[in-house]
Image: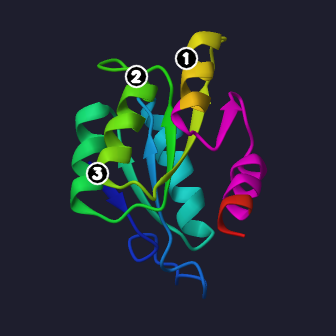
Amino acid sequence: MRRVTAKKLKKPLKEGKRQITILIVEDDQDLREALAAALCDEGYHALCAQDADEAIASVKAHKVNIVFMDICLPDMNGVEVYKAIKKIQPAATAVMMTGFFVQDLVNAAISAGAYDILYKPFTMDDILKVIKKITA
């Protein structure tokens, strides 16, 4: 688990965003770290996890408001990880991410209560729009 903060990036947190912690669960290291850095640039706290174990450890150790979760992880599918996270932090909102057409997992994610599905490739604007909807 890697915690990325605005302090590490030498940027101050923007007012009003400092209480929002976003967990990025993504096995692609470049995408995971790029999202975390961009979210920190926007003033959010970002936590990173590369797999199910790190994601669950993160939500046990930190209050998480939003989770961006890859549906296809190497050790467990994102829907099962999301269900485990909801048991630990029921108020956490999940947005599933996928680069594959996995309709059965997409349907399962929606049934489990995922807020939205983002299809890769997506833009940072797509991420920020979803965050604004969730926090409105």
Answer yes or no: is residue 102 visible. no
Cα separation, mark 3 vs mark 2, equals: 20 Å
* Rendering coords of residue 4 (x, y %): 39, 61
**On the image, numbered disc 2 is attached to which residue?**
73
Residue 39: image location, x then y, percent: 57, 61
| Residues rendered magenta in the picture | 112-132
Residue located at (25% from left, 41% from top): 54
Dot 3: what SS? helix
Of the two numbered discs 3 and 2 in the rendering, the one whose residue sits closer to the viewer: 3
Q: Residue at x 44, y 28 (%)?
A: 78
Element marked by disc 2: loop
Query: Image point 57% across, 78% down: which residue?
Result: 17
Residue under pointer 1: 105
Query: Which residue occupies the extreme bottom position in the image?
Result: 15
118 or 9: which is nearer to us? Answer: 118
Residue 114 painted magenta: yes
User: Is residue 50 visible in this depiction of the protein?
Assistant: yes
Question: Which one is earlier in the sequence, the residue at label 3 or at label 2?
Answer: 2
Q: Which residue type does callout 2 highlight?
A: Leu
Would residue 123 be counted in the magenta stretch? yes
Q: Which mark is residue 88?
A: 3
**The one of 61 and 74 positioned closer to us in this rendering:** 61
Q: Nearer the viewer, mark 1 or mark 2?
A: 1
Quarter of the image for residue 114 reads top right
Lateral position of residue 63 relative to residue 71, left or right: left
When the figure is inspected, residue 95 is found, relative to residue 47, above or below; the finding is: above
